[in-house]
Image (cartoon, helix red, strand yellow):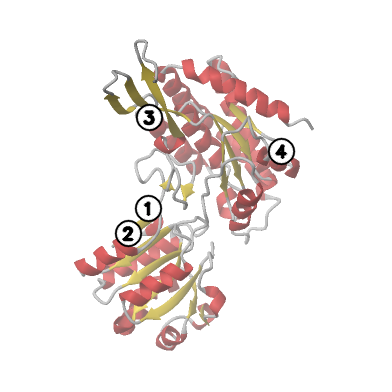
Amino acid sequence: MNYKQYFEKAKQASRTLISLSKETTDAVLLDLAAALVVNTDEILTENEKDLAKMPIEDPKYDRLKLSAARIMDIASDLKNVASLSSPLGKILSDKTLQNQLHIQKVSVPLGVVGVIYEARPNVTADVFSLCFKTGNVAVLKGGSDAEFSNRAIAKVIHEVLDKYKINRNVLTLLPAERAATEALLNARGFVDVLIPRGSQSLINYVRENSKIPVIETGAGIVHTYFDETGDLEKGKAIIFNAKTRRVSVCNSLDCVLVNENRLNDLPALLSPLADGKVELYADEKSYETLKHSYPAPLLNQASPEHFGTEFLSLRLAVKVVADLAEALNHIADYSSKHSEAIISEDAANIAQFLNEVDAAAVYANASTGFTDGAQFGLGAEIGISTQKLHARGPMGLEELTSYKWVVRGDGQVRG
Protein backbone atom coordinates (compact mmCIF):
# COMPACT_ATOMS: atom_id res chain seq x y z
CA MET A 1 0.00 0.00 0.00
CA ASN A 2 1.20 3.51 -0.79
CA TYR A 3 1.11 5.14 2.66
CA LYS A 4 2.88 8.22 1.35
CA GLN A 5 -0.40 9.45 -0.13
CA TYR A 6 -1.92 9.59 3.36
CA PHE A 7 0.95 11.71 4.64
CA GLU A 8 1.00 14.02 1.63
CA LYS A 9 -2.71 14.73 2.02
CA ALA A 10 -2.31 15.33 5.75
CA LYS A 11 0.51 17.80 5.13
CA GLN A 12 -1.56 19.64 2.54
CA ALA A 13 -4.57 19.71 4.89
CA SER A 14 -2.52 21.38 7.61
CA ARG A 15 -2.41 24.58 5.56
CA THR A 16 -6.21 24.71 5.36
CA LEU A 17 -6.58 24.89 9.13
CA ILE A 18 -4.78 28.23 9.37
CA SER A 19 -7.74 30.13 7.96
CA LEU A 20 -10.42 28.52 10.17
CA SER A 21 -12.03 30.91 12.62
CA LYS A 22 -12.30 30.08 16.31
CA GLU A 23 -16.08 30.17 15.97
CA THR A 24 -16.03 27.51 13.24
CA THR A 25 -13.56 25.34 15.15
CA ASP A 26 -15.70 25.38 18.28
CA ALA A 27 -18.90 24.78 16.31
CA VAL A 28 -17.35 21.67 14.73
CA LEU A 29 -16.38 20.30 18.15
CA LEU A 30 -19.83 20.94 19.62
CA ASP A 31 -21.52 19.33 16.63
CA LEU A 32 -19.17 16.37 16.92
CA ALA A 33 -20.05 15.93 20.60
CA ALA A 34 -23.72 15.76 19.69
CA ALA A 35 -23.10 13.47 16.71
CA LEU A 36 -21.18 10.93 18.80
CA VAL A 37 -24.11 10.68 21.21
CA VAL A 38 -26.59 10.33 18.34
CA ASN A 39 -24.45 7.53 16.88
CA THR A 40 -23.96 5.73 20.20
CA ASP A 41 -25.69 2.52 19.11
CA GLU A 42 -23.63 2.22 15.93
CA ILE A 43 -20.38 2.89 17.79
CA LEU A 44 -21.20 0.34 20.50
CA THR A 45 -22.07 -2.26 17.87
CA GLU A 46 -18.63 -1.83 16.32
CA ASN A 47 -17.00 -1.81 19.74
CA GLU A 48 -18.60 -5.18 20.50
CA LYS A 49 -16.81 -6.62 17.46
CA ASP A 50 -13.49 -5.56 18.97
CA LEU A 51 -14.38 -6.79 22.45
CA ALA A 52 -15.26 -10.19 21.03
CA LYS A 53 -11.64 -10.60 19.90
CA MET A 54 -10.12 -9.85 23.33
CA PRO A 55 -10.18 -12.02 26.48
CA ILE A 56 -12.06 -10.24 29.26
CA GLU A 57 -9.16 -10.83 31.66
CA ASP A 58 -6.78 -8.87 29.41
CA PRO A 59 -5.79 -5.61 31.20
CA LYS A 60 -6.54 -3.74 27.97
CA TYR A 61 -10.17 -4.95 27.93
CA ASP A 62 -11.41 -2.17 30.21
CA ARG A 63 -9.66 0.48 28.11
CA LEU A 64 -11.17 -0.95 24.96
CA LYS A 65 -14.71 -1.19 26.27
CA LEU A 66 -17.11 1.61 25.42
CA SER A 67 -20.55 2.22 26.89
CA ALA A 68 -23.23 4.85 26.50
CA ALA A 69 -21.87 6.54 29.62
CA ARG A 70 -18.31 6.54 28.30
CA ILE A 71 -19.44 8.02 24.98
CA MET A 72 -21.22 10.73 26.95
CA ASP A 73 -17.95 11.37 28.78
CA ILE A 74 -16.11 11.67 25.46
CA ALA A 75 -18.76 14.13 24.25
CA SER A 76 -18.38 16.09 27.48
CA ASP A 77 -14.63 16.32 26.95
CA LEU A 78 -15.21 17.64 23.43
CA LYS A 79 -17.48 20.35 24.83
CA ASN A 80 -14.85 21.23 27.40
CA VAL A 81 -12.21 21.60 24.69
CA ALA A 82 -14.56 23.82 22.67
CA SER A 83 -15.08 26.06 25.70
CA LEU A 84 -11.38 26.66 26.30
CA SER A 85 -9.42 29.58 24.94
CA SER A 86 -7.29 28.87 21.92
CA PRO A 87 -3.55 28.94 22.63
CA LEU A 88 -2.78 29.97 19.06
CA GLY A 89 -1.47 33.41 18.22
CA LYS A 90 -0.48 34.23 21.79
CA ILE A 91 2.29 36.79 22.13
CA LEU A 92 4.78 34.99 24.36
CA SER A 93 7.41 37.71 24.15
CA ASP A 94 7.42 41.22 22.71
CA LYS A 95 10.38 43.57 22.52
CA THR A 96 11.97 46.27 20.38
CA LEU A 97 15.74 46.22 20.02
CA GLN A 98 18.06 49.25 19.94
CA ASN A 99 18.13 48.98 16.14
CA GLN A 100 14.32 49.30 16.21
CA LEU A 101 13.65 45.73 15.08
CA HIS A 102 10.35 44.70 16.63
CA ILE A 103 10.52 41.02 17.67
CA GLN A 104 7.62 38.91 18.86
CA LYS A 105 7.50 35.27 19.92
CA VAL A 106 4.13 33.87 18.81
CA SER A 107 2.51 30.49 19.51
CA VAL A 108 1.77 28.35 16.44
CA PRO A 109 0.60 24.77 15.74
CA LEU A 110 3.07 21.90 15.75
CA GLY A 111 1.76 21.00 12.28
CA VAL A 112 1.02 17.32 11.66
CA VAL A 113 0.79 15.24 14.83
CA GLY A 114 1.07 11.47 14.59
CA VAL A 115 -0.27 9.27 17.38
CA ILE A 116 0.24 5.50 17.69
CA TYR A 117 -2.05 3.91 20.26
CA GLU A 118 -3.43 0.58 21.36
CA ALA A 119 -6.86 -0.42 22.68
CA ARG A 120 -8.12 3.06 23.49
CA PRO A 121 -10.89 4.16 21.10
CA ASN A 122 -11.54 7.31 23.15
CA VAL A 123 -8.12 8.51 21.98
CA THR A 124 -9.49 8.85 18.45
CA ALA A 125 -11.92 11.57 19.53
CA ASP A 126 -9.68 13.13 22.20
CA VAL A 127 -6.69 13.54 19.89
CA PHE A 128 -8.79 14.93 17.07
CA SER A 129 -10.44 17.52 19.34
CA LEU A 130 -7.16 18.75 20.81
CA CYS A 131 -5.37 18.82 17.47
CA PHE A 132 -8.26 20.51 15.67
CA LYS A 133 -8.58 23.19 18.36
CA THR A 134 -4.86 23.95 18.04
CA GLY A 135 -4.71 23.98 14.24
CA ASN A 136 -2.92 20.65 13.99
CA VAL A 137 -3.66 17.78 11.64
CA ALA A 138 -3.96 14.39 13.36
CA VAL A 139 -2.59 11.23 11.77
CA LEU A 140 -3.72 8.29 13.90
CA LYS A 141 -2.54 4.70 13.91
CA GLY A 142 -4.72 2.63 16.21
CA GLY A 143 -4.17 -1.01 16.98
CA SER A 144 -6.00 -3.88 15.33
CA ASP A 145 -7.63 -4.64 18.69
CA ALA A 146 -9.71 -1.43 18.40
CA GLU A 147 -10.03 -1.30 14.62
CA PHE A 148 -13.83 -1.34 14.37
CA SER A 149 -14.30 1.15 17.22
CA ASN A 150 -11.76 3.59 15.82
CA ARG A 151 -13.30 3.43 12.36
CA ALA A 152 -16.77 4.11 13.75
CA ILE A 153 -15.61 7.21 15.64
CA ALA A 154 -13.53 8.46 12.69
CA LYS A 155 -16.57 8.03 10.42
CA VAL A 156 -18.60 10.37 12.63
CA ILE A 157 -15.75 12.91 12.71
CA HIS A 158 -15.46 12.90 8.91
CA GLU A 159 -19.22 13.35 8.52
CA VAL A 160 -19.12 16.46 10.72
CA LEU A 161 -16.09 17.82 8.83
CA ASP A 162 -17.96 17.28 5.55
CA LYS A 163 -20.90 19.23 6.92
CA TYR A 164 -18.63 22.25 7.39
CA LYS A 165 -16.81 21.67 4.09
CA ILE A 166 -13.52 21.19 5.92
CA ASN A 167 -10.84 19.00 4.37
CA ARG A 168 -11.46 15.60 5.95
CA ASN A 169 -7.73 14.86 5.81
CA VAL A 170 -7.30 16.98 8.94
CA LEU A 171 -8.03 13.61 10.54
CA THR A 172 -6.34 10.59 9.00
CA LEU A 173 -6.94 7.16 10.50
CA LEU A 174 -4.35 4.81 9.02
CA PRO A 175 -5.13 1.15 8.36
CA ALA A 176 -4.71 -1.07 11.41
CA GLU A 177 -1.99 -3.26 9.92
CA ARG A 178 1.56 -3.20 11.23
CA ALA A 179 2.96 -1.88 7.94
CA ALA A 180 1.17 1.41 8.61
CA THR A 181 3.11 1.78 11.86
CA GLU A 182 6.41 1.33 10.05
CA ALA A 183 5.38 3.88 7.42
CA LEU A 184 4.40 6.43 10.09
CA LEU A 185 7.69 5.96 11.92
CA ASN A 186 9.45 6.90 8.69
CA ALA A 187 7.16 9.75 7.55
CA ARG A 188 9.89 12.33 7.92
CA GLY A 189 9.08 15.54 6.13
CA PHE A 190 5.34 14.95 6.47
CA VAL A 191 4.70 14.33 10.19
CA ASP A 192 6.20 16.83 12.63
CA VAL A 193 5.96 14.94 15.91
CA LEU A 194 4.99 11.43 16.99
CA ILE A 195 3.28 10.50 20.26
CA PRO A 196 2.95 6.83 21.32
CA ARG A 197 0.21 5.89 23.77
CA GLY A 198 0.16 2.40 25.18
CA SER A 199 2.36 -0.21 26.79
CA GLN A 200 5.98 0.33 27.70
CA SER A 201 6.98 -2.03 24.89
CA LEU A 202 5.09 0.10 22.35
CA ILE A 203 6.66 3.29 23.66
CA ASN A 204 10.14 1.77 23.60
CA TYR A 205 9.64 0.51 20.06
CA VAL A 206 8.50 3.91 18.79
CA ARG A 207 11.35 5.74 20.53
CA GLU A 208 13.97 3.36 19.17
CA ASN A 209 12.69 3.22 15.59
CA SER A 210 11.13 6.58 14.78
CA LYS A 211 12.83 9.00 12.41
CA ILE A 212 10.43 11.68 13.66
CA PRO A 213 10.77 13.54 16.99
CA VAL A 214 8.94 11.58 19.70
CA ILE A 215 7.13 12.80 22.81
CA GLU A 216 6.96 9.86 25.20
CA THR A 217 3.77 9.26 27.14
CA GLY A 218 5.29 6.68 29.43
CA ALA A 219 3.90 3.88 31.48
CA GLY A 220 2.87 4.65 35.05
CA ILE A 221 4.65 2.85 37.88
CA VAL A 222 2.94 4.77 40.67
CA HIS A 223 3.74 4.89 44.40
CA THR A 224 2.00 6.32 47.45
CA TYR A 225 4.01 6.77 50.65
CA PHE A 226 2.10 6.64 53.96
CA ASP A 227 4.19 8.76 56.30
CA GLU A 228 4.59 8.41 60.06
CA THR A 229 2.17 11.31 60.49
CA GLY A 230 -0.29 10.17 57.82
CA ASP A 231 -4.01 10.48 58.63
CA LEU A 232 -5.48 6.97 58.63
CA GLU A 233 -8.89 7.88 57.24
CA LYS A 234 -7.41 10.02 54.47
CA GLY A 235 -4.98 7.23 53.69
CA LYS A 236 -7.66 4.56 53.43
CA ALA A 237 -9.73 6.62 51.01
CA ILE A 238 -6.79 7.81 48.90
CA ILE A 239 -5.13 4.40 48.51
CA PHE A 240 -8.43 2.66 47.73
CA ASN A 241 -9.36 5.25 45.11
CA ALA A 242 -5.91 5.35 43.52
CA LYS A 243 -5.87 1.55 43.17
CA THR A 244 -9.46 0.63 42.34
CA ARG A 245 -11.09 3.59 40.57
CA ARG A 246 -9.96 2.25 37.20
CA VAL A 247 -7.17 -0.29 37.32
CA SER A 248 -6.22 -0.25 33.64
CA VAL A 249 -5.12 3.38 33.46
CA CYS A 250 -1.57 4.67 33.85
CA ASN A 251 -2.27 6.72 36.99
CA SER A 252 -3.45 3.64 38.89
CA LEU A 253 -1.50 2.88 42.08
CA ASP A 254 1.10 0.09 41.90
CA CYS A 255 2.97 0.25 45.21
CA VAL A 256 2.21 1.41 48.75
CA LEU A 257 5.18 2.38 50.92
CA VAL A 258 4.44 2.41 54.66
CA ASN A 259 6.50 4.01 57.42
CA GLU A 260 7.52 1.24 59.85
CA ASN A 261 6.20 3.25 62.80
CA ARG A 262 2.68 2.83 61.34
CA LEU A 263 2.82 -0.94 60.89
CA ASN A 264 0.06 -1.41 63.47
CA ASP A 265 -2.24 0.68 61.29
CA LEU A 266 -1.45 -1.25 58.10
CA PRO A 267 -4.36 -3.74 58.38
CA ALA A 268 -6.84 -0.88 58.78
CA LEU A 269 -5.14 1.20 56.09
CA LEU A 270 -5.50 -1.54 53.48
CA SER A 271 -8.76 -3.08 54.69
CA PRO A 272 -10.90 -1.38 51.97
CA LEU A 273 -8.70 -3.08 49.35
CA ALA A 274 -9.83 -6.48 50.58
CA ASP A 275 -13.43 -5.54 49.85
CA GLY A 276 -12.25 -4.50 46.39
CA LYS A 277 -10.63 -7.92 45.83
CA VAL A 278 -7.17 -6.39 45.46
CA GLU A 279 -4.36 -8.96 45.51
CA LEU A 280 -1.34 -7.85 47.54
CA TYR A 281 2.33 -8.65 47.09
CA ALA A 282 3.78 -7.76 50.48
CA ASP A 283 7.39 -7.61 51.63
CA GLU A 284 8.38 -9.60 54.73
CA LYS A 285 7.41 -7.06 57.39
CA SER A 286 4.09 -6.12 55.83
CA TYR A 287 3.25 -9.76 55.13
CA GLU A 288 3.75 -10.70 58.78
CA THR A 289 1.55 -7.79 59.82
CA LEU A 290 -1.23 -8.55 57.34
CA LYS A 291 -1.37 -12.35 57.42
CA HIS A 292 -3.88 -12.46 60.28
CA SER A 293 -6.21 -9.80 58.87
CA TYR A 294 -6.05 -9.69 55.07
CA PRO A 295 -7.82 -12.51 53.17
CA ALA A 296 -5.30 -15.30 52.64
CA PRO A 297 -6.22 -15.94 48.97
CA LEU A 298 -5.41 -12.29 48.22
CA LEU A 299 -2.15 -12.06 50.17
CA ASN A 300 1.20 -13.08 48.68
CA GLN A 301 4.82 -12.61 49.64
CA ALA A 302 6.49 -10.17 47.30
CA SER A 303 9.36 -11.04 44.99
CA PRO A 304 11.83 -8.43 43.70
CA GLU A 305 10.03 -8.21 40.36
CA HIS A 306 6.83 -6.97 42.01
CA PHE A 307 8.50 -3.65 42.78
CA GLY A 308 8.79 -1.58 39.63
CA THR A 309 5.85 -3.33 37.96
CA GLU A 310 2.91 -1.54 36.35
CA PHE A 311 0.15 -4.00 37.23
CA LEU A 312 -2.85 -2.54 35.31
CA SER A 313 -5.03 -4.90 37.33
CA LEU A 314 -6.31 -5.50 40.87
CA ARG A 315 -2.81 -6.18 42.18
CA LEU A 316 -0.64 -4.03 44.42
CA ALA A 317 2.83 -4.20 45.95
CA VAL A 318 3.38 -3.24 49.61
CA LYS A 319 6.71 -2.36 51.24
CA VAL A 320 7.70 -1.12 54.69
CA VAL A 321 10.31 1.66 54.82
CA ALA A 322 12.19 3.11 57.78
CA ASP A 323 11.51 6.75 56.98
CA LEU A 324 10.93 9.34 54.29
CA ALA A 325 14.51 9.04 53.06
CA GLU A 326 14.09 5.33 52.31
CA ALA A 327 10.76 6.01 50.61
CA LEU A 328 12.39 8.64 48.40
CA ASN A 329 15.21 6.24 47.51
CA HIS A 330 12.74 3.48 46.60
CA ILE A 331 10.73 5.83 44.39
CA ALA A 332 13.90 7.09 42.71
CA ASP A 333 14.90 3.50 41.92
CA TYR A 334 11.54 2.24 40.63
CA SER A 335 9.44 5.21 39.49
CA SER A 336 8.57 5.73 35.83
CA LYS A 337 8.34 9.47 36.62
CA HIS A 338 4.58 9.57 36.07
CA SER A 339 2.71 10.24 39.35
CA GLU A 340 3.83 9.88 42.97
CA ALA A 341 2.07 10.73 46.25
CA ILE A 342 2.66 11.23 49.97
CA ILE A 343 0.06 10.98 52.74
CA SER A 344 1.34 13.05 55.63
CA GLU A 345 0.46 15.76 58.15
CA ASP A 346 4.07 16.88 58.46
CA ALA A 347 4.58 20.08 56.45
CA ALA A 348 8.34 19.62 56.25
CA ASN A 349 8.04 16.03 54.97
CA ILE A 350 5.43 17.08 52.43
CA ALA A 351 7.62 19.90 51.18
CA GLN A 352 10.65 17.61 50.90
CA PHE A 353 8.65 14.95 49.03
CA LEU A 354 7.14 17.41 46.56
CA ASN A 355 10.52 19.03 45.98
CA GLU A 356 12.69 15.92 45.64
CA VAL A 357 10.51 13.41 43.80
CA ASP A 358 11.24 13.49 40.06
CA ALA A 359 7.88 12.87 38.41
CA ALA A 360 5.50 14.64 36.05
CA ALA A 361 2.90 14.97 38.82
CA VAL A 362 3.52 14.86 42.57
CA TYR A 363 0.73 14.80 45.16
CA ALA A 364 0.27 15.47 48.85
CA ASN A 365 -2.81 13.94 50.49
CA ALA A 366 -4.65 13.25 47.23
CA SER A 367 -5.19 10.34 44.86
CA THR A 368 -2.92 9.93 41.86
CA GLY A 369 -6.11 9.22 39.92
CA PHE A 370 -6.30 12.95 39.23
CA THR A 371 -3.38 12.82 36.76
CA ASP A 372 -5.62 13.39 33.78
CA GLY A 373 -5.95 16.22 31.30
CA ALA A 374 -9.65 16.80 31.94
CA GLN A 375 -9.13 16.74 35.71
CA PHE A 376 -6.33 19.29 35.39
CA GLY A 377 -8.67 21.65 33.56
CA LEU A 378 -7.17 20.98 30.12
CA GLY A 379 -10.43 19.76 28.58
CA ALA A 380 -8.90 16.46 27.51
CA GLU A 381 -5.41 15.14 26.94
CA ILE A 382 -3.37 13.74 24.12
CA GLY A 383 -1.27 11.80 26.62
CA ILE A 384 0.77 12.16 29.79
CA SER A 385 4.36 12.96 28.99
CA THR A 386 7.00 11.54 31.35
CA GLN A 387 9.89 13.24 29.60
CA LYS A 388 11.22 16.75 30.15
CA LEU A 389 11.67 18.25 26.68
CA HIS A 390 8.80 20.31 25.29
CA ALA A 391 6.03 18.96 27.54
CA ARG A 392 5.60 17.12 30.84
CA GLY A 393 2.52 15.64 32.47
CA PRO A 394 -0.96 15.82 30.91
CA MET A 395 -0.67 17.33 27.44
CA GLY A 396 -3.51 19.66 26.57
CA LEU A 397 -3.90 22.52 24.12
CA GLU A 398 -0.83 24.56 25.01
CA GLU A 399 1.40 21.48 24.78
CA LEU A 400 0.31 21.02 21.16
CA THR A 401 1.82 24.33 20.13
CA SER A 402 5.28 25.53 19.31
CA TYR A 403 6.24 29.11 18.49
CA LYS A 404 7.88 31.20 15.82
CA TRP A 405 9.72 34.52 15.91
CA VAL A 406 8.01 37.35 14.04
CA VAL A 407 10.42 40.18 13.19
CA ARG A 408 9.28 43.54 11.80
CA GLY A 409 11.72 46.12 10.49
CA ASP A 410 11.94 49.24 8.36
CA GLY A 411 14.91 48.58 6.13
CA GLN A 412 17.43 47.43 8.77
CA VAL A 413 20.45 45.50 7.52
CA ARG A 414 23.09 43.73 9.57
CA GLY A 415 26.63 45.06 9.50
Disc 1 to disc 3, C-alpha distance: 23 Å
In the displayed structure, would residue 411 be above or below residue 250? Answer: above
Left or right: residue 153 versus residue 106 is right
Amino acid marked by disc 1: Phe
Nearer-the-camera pick, 179 or 106: 106
Disc 2 to disc 1, C-alpha distance: 9 Å
Reading the image, the residue beneath label 3 is: 87
Q: Secondary structure at mark 3?
A: loop
Q: Are marks 2 and 1 in contact (CB under 8 Å)?
A: yes
In the displayed structure, would residue 47 be above or below residue 324? Answer: above
Of the numbered discs in the image, which one, if any, rests on residue 183?
Answer: 4
For marks 2 and 3, the one nearer the N-term is 3
Q: Are marks 2 and 3 in contact (CB under 8 Å)?
A: no
Q: Position of residue 164 (x, y in %)?
A: 53, 15
Q: How many marks?
A: 4
Reading the image, the residue beneath label 1 is: 370
Amino acid marked by disc 4: Ala
Q: Secondary structure at mark 2?
A: strand
Amino acid marked by disc 2: Tyr
For marks 1 and 3, the one nearer the N-term is 3
Disc 4 to disc 1, C-alpha distance: 35 Å
* Mark closer to the observer (2, 3): 3
Disc 2 to disc 3, C-alpha distance: 27 Å
Corner quadrant of residue 114: top right
The residue drawn where x is 39% and y is 38% is 379
Task: Tell me the quadrant of the picture where the C terminus can be found.
Answer: top left
Of the numbered discs in the image, which one, if any, rests on residue 363?
Answer: 2
Q: Are marks 2 and 4 in contact (CB under 8 Å)?
A: no
Nearer-the-camera pick, 75 or 109: 109
